Image: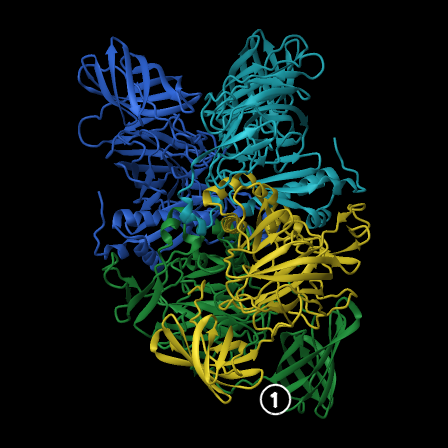
Chain colours: A blue, B green, C yellow, D cyan
Amino acid sequence: MTVRILLLFACLWATSASASETERWRVVIDLWGNPVHQTLELNRDGARLSGTLDGDPLTGRAEGAQLRVTATANDRHYHLHGTRDADALMGTADFPDPNQPERRAEHAFTATRLPSRPPGPPRLIDFVPRDYANLFSADRAPVLTIWPGDTVRTRTLDSGGVDEHGVTRALFGNPQVGPFYVDGAEPGDVLAVTLHRLRPNRDHADSLDALVGRAQGLGLATQAGALGKPVRWRLDRVRGIALPPPGSGLDGLTIPLRPMLGGIAVAPGFGFPPMSAGDSGRFGGNMDFNQIVEGTTVYLPVAQPGALLYLGDAHAAQGDGEISQYGLETSMDVEFSVAVIKERALATPRVESATRLMAIGQAGSLDEAVRAATQGLIQWLQQDYRLSLSEASQLLGAAVEYRIITLAGRNAGVAAMLDKTSLATLRASPKRE
Amino acid sequence: MTVRILLLFACLWATSASASETERWRVVIDLWGNPVHQTLELNRDGARLSGTLDGDPLTGRAEGAQLRVTATANDRHYHLHGTRDADALMGTADFPDPNQPERRAEHAFTATRLPSRPPGPPRLIDFVPRDYANLFSADRAPVLTIWPGDTVRTRTLDSGGVDEHGVTRALFGNPQVGPFYVDGAEPGDVLAVTLHRLRPNRDHADSLDALVGRAQGLGLATQAGALGKPVRWRLDRVRGIALPPPGSGLDGLTIPLRPMLGGIAVAPGFGFPPMSAGDSGRFGGNMDFNQIVEGTTVYLPVAQPGALLYLGDAHAAQGDGEISQYGLETSMDVEFSVAVIKERALATPRVESATRLMAIGQAGSLDEAVRAATQGLIQWLQQDYRLSLSEASQLLGAAVEYRIITLAGRNAGVAAMLDKTSLATLRASPKRE
Amino acid sequence: MTVRILLLFACLWATSASASETERWRVVIDLWGNPVHQTLELNRDGARLSGTLDGDPLTGRAEGAQLRVTATANDRHYHLHGTRDADALMGTADFPDPNQPERRAEHAFTATRLPSRPPGPPRLIDFVPRDYANLFSADRAPVLTIWPGDTVRTRTLDSGGVDEHGVTRALFGNPQVGPFYVDGAEPGDVLAVTLHRLRPNRDHADSLDALVGRAQGLGLATQAGALGKPVRWRLDRVRGIALPPPGSGLDGLTIPLRPMLGGIAVAPGFGFPPMSAGDSGRFGGNMDFNQIVEGTTVYLPVAQPGALLYLGDAHAAQGDGEISQYGLETSMDVEFSVAVIKERALATPRVESATRLMAIGQAGSLDEAVRAATQGLIQWLQQDYRLSLSEASQLLGAAVEYRIITLAGRNAGVAAMLDKTSLATLRASPKRE
Amino acid sequence: MTVRILLLFACLWATSASASETERWRVVIDLWGNPVHQTLELNRDGARLSGTLDGDPLTGRAEGAQLRVTATANDRHYHLHGTRDADALMGTADFPDPNQPERRAEHAFTATRLPSRPPGPPRLIDFVPRDYANLFSADRAPVLTIWPGDTVRTRTLDSGGVDEHGVTRALFGNPQVGPFYVDGAEPGDVLAVTLHRLRPNRDHADSLDALVGRAQGLGLATQAGALGKPVRWRLDRVRGIALPPPGSGLDGLTIPLRPMLGGIAVAPGFGFPPMSAGDSGRFGGNMDFNQIVEGTTVYLPVAQPGALLYLGDAHAAQGDGEISQYGLETSMDVEFSVAVIKERALATPRVESATRLMAIGQAGSLDEAVRAATQGLIQWLQQDYRLSLSEASQLLGAAVEYRIITLAGRNAGVAAMLDKTSLATLRASPKRE
């Protein structure tokens, strides 16, 4: 079998809670060795429990530390019973066998209490990472819980795991900061991440003189074998330029710094394994898009409770396609804030700048990636500008811009982009939250 | 067999000429039904003839209207004898059988005298087309002979064959003006065509609301069947904008005019058939690249004597990819001049603007087209900026821009582009003619 | 504009005919330099003419050698008048301007009388070619008119134009025998060509040691540059094997002869240019499919009156993909017969053997070719076995076989194949003519 | 950065061992949260220790339960010290910082003692799985240690996690049996798995009536949305056929059973994340190749100590491409044995049957997959038949067969196949271990 769409048979259960207050828990069910993450909301009225699990309604009873609930999804009942203390809950859940509904299977679960939003306005948080993730995964414990509106100041390592002092702090391969648990983000929502500041925090960047396979025509392949050597660029942060190592035919060359974030992701959904920090998909990931720069907002489809935001792998500059396998890899100061758009379908990751809409298509070939990018941009126009497919086609036919994002990863990437000034003159006012 | 590289077995012969003057002839040999075009240079010293055929040396004798010459290529001898009058020459050529060199085969040929360059400075010529070509072909008679430095003012029909008055003047399918015979251009050279002026000469452009197959993801395909309707845009040439037909969700939209030439080509070389005016390749053709605008220079590899330049299919504006199958198709005033760069290898067509180098890759998939574009740009940097492959890879890795040119033809197209300001700071001065 | 589907504005006219007999003519109209081929049927009743042009009804009058008719298609009227003698007809046709219907444009036409079917049973015809075509074109004069049921015995050159005696008879690049005009075949029909005999008629075959670009991974590219040398195989026609040249690591190798026809085509339809004998498409062409062997029937969609069948480029044997650029190229004795299936849609060329259905997909990439092949096979199952799309998907999911046909041409080719024994057990009897 | 090739900075250390005996340990080092698996061989002579870690030489000392060793790779020294008991070892390792070699970083490690080979001939082991893996991972504990020559009898669930009794035993998505630790297999070796028996052990198989995206041409896409329904086939194991559900146009159809193993894998190497049991790569995985049947041997490149063999996802039958997303999914009795070929490079997975060599190419597009398959087959011919690239090209050009393996996964798959009877007649005797 090839698995494309995994339909989670909905899970549900209950927990005790004090008085009539609502408690929220982050639940992990062990489905034959595979952790499933869900949000449990529990209201207690005396011994009676009500609430939701992963959005499905539940009822139950609490007796002392014991609780026993039944939830219902698609006319099927799921039972769970557990024992709680202040911040932890554990027990077993039983589900009908999807192939023999009269049979039931028991699965262990654990849960941790979700914190309440701190009082006051959105916060500005300085977050100093202590360790780094080489996988985009729902199974890694969140490093911080944040709320929509909060702003975080942090710093990323370079793709080799090296910090602003040149010290190796993590394993090479795009180690990421995170995940940040964004309270209130649930599967089906969209996480909007605005990058307020993106600045290299050291004076060099590491790259290669390589040519990735997808860029190598046969005419070059015979010579390309000699490539692949490290190249250390100097970053002149005052003048805002990068300079290649002296002594080559590139002497005199200056490349404007254009700091970008190569990796930005939410955790992949249930049914997807932990993904390499070098991989990409609808969840974002190592997209290596040189238009994800200071001032842009990245939209990603939430697939796990809390979204679980990761970021890393910043580049001081990068050509389209990242065809030398590395951009100008460096450590970076990063400042971002988050927002949650509830229940919004998103075929592809999106990026918005002051002047442009950009839909990102990613697939095993450019020919498929451009289809995904086109579909993503048309979906955006249909959702926010109320255009029909015919109208969107006319507009794109006259004005779309396609850039190749990356040729360097397992996925190739293509961006379909539109100038927002064209859209500003549309009589149909955009539909926006 | 699949034919990729056709090695023309070199042909040669002679002709009489008056006094010691050099004559130049355009020769057509009939190779088993296939016309081969070559240039014959003939010097006469009394009855003795010398010169070249397709660059190969020849010797011979003229007696009255008869001439008999032998040319030599790769140690093989080719004989031809013919009869001439003032401007025409005809006869037979015999070649060794490539598979049985002791056998010889006879082929008829004809030739027409090439004119001499008019005295004086380069000319400005107004050329009014009388008919149009639906094929890019070496076999169509030139409509005009021009010399490097000459400037031509002409006008193109829209892709449907319709002129500035709305009258159909040619068959739909990108009818082209030309071919222009560029004196002195020979296979192995490069033709440089600079577009000095490119202006729509009517007030409407025709397009569709389609989505080409290469842009259609499966999610759109179910709805895309209803598309394909004609859409007539209004061109406001004073304000420099295009407006969609009123009454749709696009009301209020204005697209800036950005006139471009969809078709620009030299005749394909021997071994290639006449190509549809909708096709493309190393010879250029229906590339539909929205960066071929006023002020740019297009470089094409000459594959036939005289280059045989065609142009047509202008668009008032077009998004990348031409994904609605048509751009904003309109008739156009065109002014261009030509130059010839001798003996320059060119892996792909190139376009140069005031600010950018752009190499065009075209192939049956985007994944192959991007390889061709990369190779073309690297070749350019190696030729004109003396960069090594390693240096070119570093530069592209940091600064290349990839745009998708077209998704609408048999070939997909990709442009690899570099900002010339980066290159201007290189210490290695560009090597230029 | 990129031209995909060219809608011929229907043309029509009339001609005189003697008495009440029906005459059939092959008409060529010159549409601004582009020949259009159509069939004219003309019935004469006194001075009154009736009949069809390209299937559209017409009425008119004949006066002496003059005739004047009006035909109607899609509510538009077309007039033509001409002069005839016994076997020729010429004159002018006028059509409304598609963009300004009140304007009319005149186009010259000529026509030649089509012969009547010879009396008696289908014929066995020995046809010795005198010259060969390097293009698949509707514009080449037919070499022979044949009728459904007729069988033709002829011989093809190898792809280099060399005959059974080693003598070069035509230009390299798959020179073809034909075109054969198949009386009664009209656009919208299917031509079925059954290959009764396919035998090499000499004792050697020419090939290369090359690796085409589509087969070259980057790991091989560095070494592949040294390839491309000619390799002459010995054909032992008695033992039915091919042997490589002695003295290499292949000593002792024998490859079973499996003679196949690389090129089989009908003329491409109006709107397509003459296609290189190395190219392929829905019309067939240089498909290089090693399952087109003795005993198979090839189905091609007719796009021009008379179908205009071409064949050539036989191989003594060939691996899938023709990845050494050449198969085992040789001259061949060929015997075939033709049938016409009226008004049958055909998304792709098809091949049928005693045991298998094979639909051929051809496109600029394998990824598109496999889609076309799948669609072609499903269409076949829907047409002839009355399967729904759901049923066809179940069948293919369990039993389809995909072979790569060619990697060597501009198009890549893929075959989707089904064993007919599976289908024989279907209760739903196949719907067959 | 995009990570392609991860160069593990070699790790090393020591451990104590009793007397002069050699001990072997399976070591796991925690590299900033990423487990690295290596094999430690330790010889003890009094207090002096020698041996290897991941093949690198080491020296050290044991004092009581403490041990302290230094290993050397590429002139760099690595220190580790730890504490052991009978079967466990733990401690810290320090490595130089790859970016600042004078700095050193400490990493925790643990190790478990590897068992010795049981005395006697190779064993026949009945293995009943208790749980199943939904990831191909080096981090899952081996379920069994086996030695080259051993044969294992076990059974696989269907891709939905359902066993021979229809009971769900694991999470859908190709749950796998394993991993089996194959003693002696080290990175750089090849694991050969011979499938002696592959038989469905129940009377039904589950499939869909879907068409995967890679098989859907645009012409089908409009109808394909209605597909995707479950289809339960009946397996008649006595007659060896599968029958579709009655009542459709497929009534009467019988498909021969051809049981195959969709998933067979070794653990991916360091630098690759755990891979979904639905994914594939050089490590094998969910290749879904319908030629991996009873009697074949599968060769996979070992990338982790012990190879860590997984298998699952058997199909009763499957067409090429698995284009209905599922094959005929069923539970299966499986019997296999293993062998290890030391130090053999393997560009791609290989399959060998009694009659054929088959190299498997897998990539994000068919166009890349066919290149990988070709390269894999040429490598095989170079290694085992001593052919040069030129000779291999001639052979493939005349005799290769390409089958499409899968269109259903993230990777597309292509097999390049050769008939071994051709090879049997080669004078150059194959070089074989």
Q: Position of residue A311 (x, y in %)?
A: 37, 35
**Image position of D342 with respect to A300: above or below:** above
Q: Position of residue C95 (x, y in %)?
A: 40, 78
Q: Nearer the viewer, residue A254 or A397?
A: A397
Dot 1: element: loop
Q: Nearer the viewer, residue D54 or A351?
A: A351
> The residue under label 1 is which amino acid type?
Asp
Q: Is residue C358 left or right of residue D220?
A: right
Q: Nearer the viewer, residue B259 or C392?
A: C392
Evaluate whether residue C36 shows in this view.
no
Dividing the picture into quadrants, the one containing residue D235 is: top right
Evaluate whether residue C138 shows in this view.
yes
Q: Residue at x 18, y 26 (%)?
A: A119
Mark 1 crowd level (few <14, some 14–19, many ≥20, 10 Å Cα): few
Which residue in the structure is indicated by mark 1? B87
Dividing the picture into quadrants, the one containing residue D81 is: top right
**Image position of C79 with respect to C412: above or below:** below
Q: Quadrant of the N terminus of chain C?
A: bottom left
Q: Position of residue A95 (x, y in %)?
A: 37, 20
